[in-house]
Amino acid sequence: MNYTSLLLDHSPASPVATITLNRPDKRNALNPTLISEITHAFTTLGADESVKVIVLAANGKVFCAGMDLAYLLEISHNSVMQNKADSRRFHDMLTAIYSCPKPVIARVQGAAIAGGCGIASVCDIVVASREKALFGYSEVKIGFIPAIVSVYLVRRIGGTQAQRLLLTAENVNADEAYRLGFATHVADDTALDATVAGIATMLATNSASAMALTKEILGNLSGMSLDAALDYACAMNAIARTTDDFKRGVEGFVQKA
């Protein structure tokens, strides 16, 4: 696929791939093209065995301003069925990121608003610029509702603080996002790239299959009873024991002992 709204950087010699939103003149706002390209890029990299970690970044001063204004105006005139199909495409994009078997690091160098905040919320690790990052859900200000992104936000930070962010539509800075459990790391702007690179390098030393199975477990546990969760965990534990990475890891450990 020839991308027009994002950049894909992946050297076969590196286990880290970087997807960069590249509509800086539009504040990296989401339109059908960008949504489709994000979905495709994560699906493709998720299946690429040479990739162990994905960094999601953005060019310009804004990480992602949510839906493109021209696009919002267009969908306001669509039929219910057209909007249902469009919502499904947005859902599919978030799912492609959230369910990607590779750890995903969001490099948030500026504002992540509405759908842009939703994108950050489905990444495994969120590294935020202390000086410039902002996070907020502005949907209720324009008569819209943060329906799809709310599901992920509640999972990420819990219901009480999710209610606060979704109903007030306030923007919070990096330190507050960290306090709420939304951001996992905060770095000074000058140290943002080094922090992201350090985390990516650390992740890349781990077993790809073990990280994929761990992500699968974490994604499926919500809503399970204790007994069901433990049964599921036992089954996943058994699967992990059959992987090549586990066998190599045990052999290496025994040889060192």
Image (tube, helix red, strand yellow):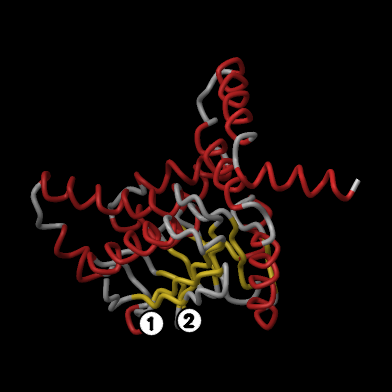
Residue 254 located left or right of residue 18: right
Residue for point 65% across, 79% down: 189
Residue 146 picture location, percent across and down: 36, 49
Relative to the observer, which residue lies in front, 16 or 169? Answer: 16
Residue that numbered label 1 is attached to: 24
Label 2 close to label 1 by CB (< 8 Å): yes
What's the amino acid at mark 2?
Lys
Question: Residue 35: x, y in percent?
Answer: 29, 63
Q: Residue 199: which quarter of the image?
A: bottom right
**SS for dot 1:** helix
Residue 122 pos. (x, y %): 48, 52
Q: Residue at x 28, y 52 (%)?
A: 143
> Does residue 201 appear to the left or right of 5 in the view shown?
right
Q: Is 22 on the left or on the right of 73, as rendered?
A: right
**Outermost residue, top side:** 227
Viewer-side residue, 240 vs 173: 240
Residue found at x 46% / y 51%: 100
Look at label 1 and name its amino acid.
Pro
Q: Quadrant of residue 178?
A: bottom right
Residue 241 numbered tag: none
Mark 2 or mark 1: name the one nearer the start of the chain: 1
Q: Secondary structure at mark 2?
A: loop
Rendered-image quadrant of the N terminus = bottom left
Q: Residue at x 50, y 77 (%)?
A: 11
Q: Measure the alpha-carbon separation of dots 2 and 1.
A: 7 Å
Residue pointed to by mark 2 = 61
